[in-house]
Image (cartoon, rainbow, N blue to C red):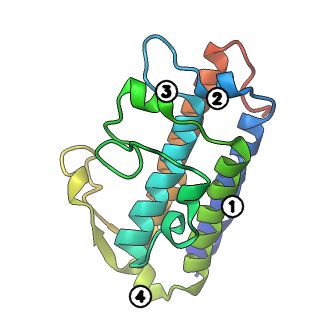
Amino acid sequence: MKDAATLGKNIVFWHWFPEMLLEGLTSDQLRWQPDTHDTSVQFAIWHAYRAEDELLHGMVFGRPSVYTSEHWADRLPAGQTGATPFGNGLTREGIAALAFEPHHLLAYAKAVGESVVGWLEAASEAELRAEVKLPFFTGVYPGVDVMTKLDTVAFFSIGHVSEHLGEVQFLRGLMGLRGAPL
């Protein structure tokens, strides 16, 4: 299906893009939190791909996450994750306590992207058009409480991910650094 192939190309891009954003950052810059916000560069990236991984694999693909099936807990350990496995509700202190190796964050992002693209390539048109209920979005995002599987993949693999990568660029700017060279 043409829509799925186009989506797959975009997913590859959005799962490679963090390489530019992390290039040259120190450990302190990866973990820096502005006074008025709890997030950090590493948290925003980790959260974006962990959420995509858990939600798509669990709700759309019906299989274990890449994080679980490929044993990423050893490479991206998170003692606390808040209310979800991907950091929702994590306190400022909990976010500050996270310490990930940048190469592991980048490899994980690519692994999640490859898994999603693999699913898209194998899915039938009927499967892509099947609906997914997203009850946790009712009242949060209008019209996002039920979507097709294809739209759900686009929402999490591009929409949600790019939202957090924009946040990373903003954080870089607050640190006096340049964002992506585009």
The Cα–Cα distance between marks 2 and 1, rounded to whole angstroms, is 23 Å
Q: Amino acid at mark 4?
A: Ala
- Alpha-carbon span between mark 2 and mark 4: 42 Å
Asked if disc 2 and disc 4 are in contact, CB closer than 8 Å, the reply is no
Question: Is the residue under label 1 in contact with that under label 3 (CB below 8 Å)?
Answer: no
- Residue drawn at (64%, 48%), measured in percent from left and top? 105
Residue 141 on image: x %, y % = 28, 46
Q: Position of residue 125 (x, y in %)?
A: 47, 86
Give the x, y percent position of residue 133.
25, 67
Q: CA distance from mark 3 to mark 4?
A: 44 Å
Sooner in the amino-acid sequence: mark 3 or mark 2: 2
**Would you identify the image quadrant in which residue 89 lies?**
top left
Tag in front: 1 or 4: 1
Regarding mark 3 in the picture, which secondary structure is present there?
helix
Classed neighbour count for the residue bearing mark 2: other residues with Cα under 10 Å, few (<14), some (14–19), many (≥20): many
* Amino acid at pointer 3: Ala
Contact flag, marks 3 and 4 (Cβ < 8 Å) = no
For marks 2 and 1, the one nearer the N-term is 1
The quadrant where residue 94 appears? top left
Between the C-alphas of marks 1 and 4, the distance is 23 Å
**Mark 3 touching mark 2, by CB under 8 A?**
no
Task: Give the mark nearest the N terminus, 1 or 4.
Answer: 1
Look at mark 3 in the image and give the residue it sits on: 96
> Mark 2 or mark 1: which is in front?
2
Q: From the image, tell me which residue sits under label 2.
A: 30
- Contact (CB < 8 A) between labels 1 and 4? no
Question: Which residue type carries mark 2?
Answer: Leu
Judged by depth in the image, the label closer to the viewer, 3 or 2, is 3
- The disc, 3 or 1, on the residue closer to the chain's N-terminal end is 1
Q: Mark on residue 126?
A: 4
| Residue at the disc numbered 1 | 12
Task: Identify the residue at horizontal 77%, vertical 39% (top origin).
Answer: 20
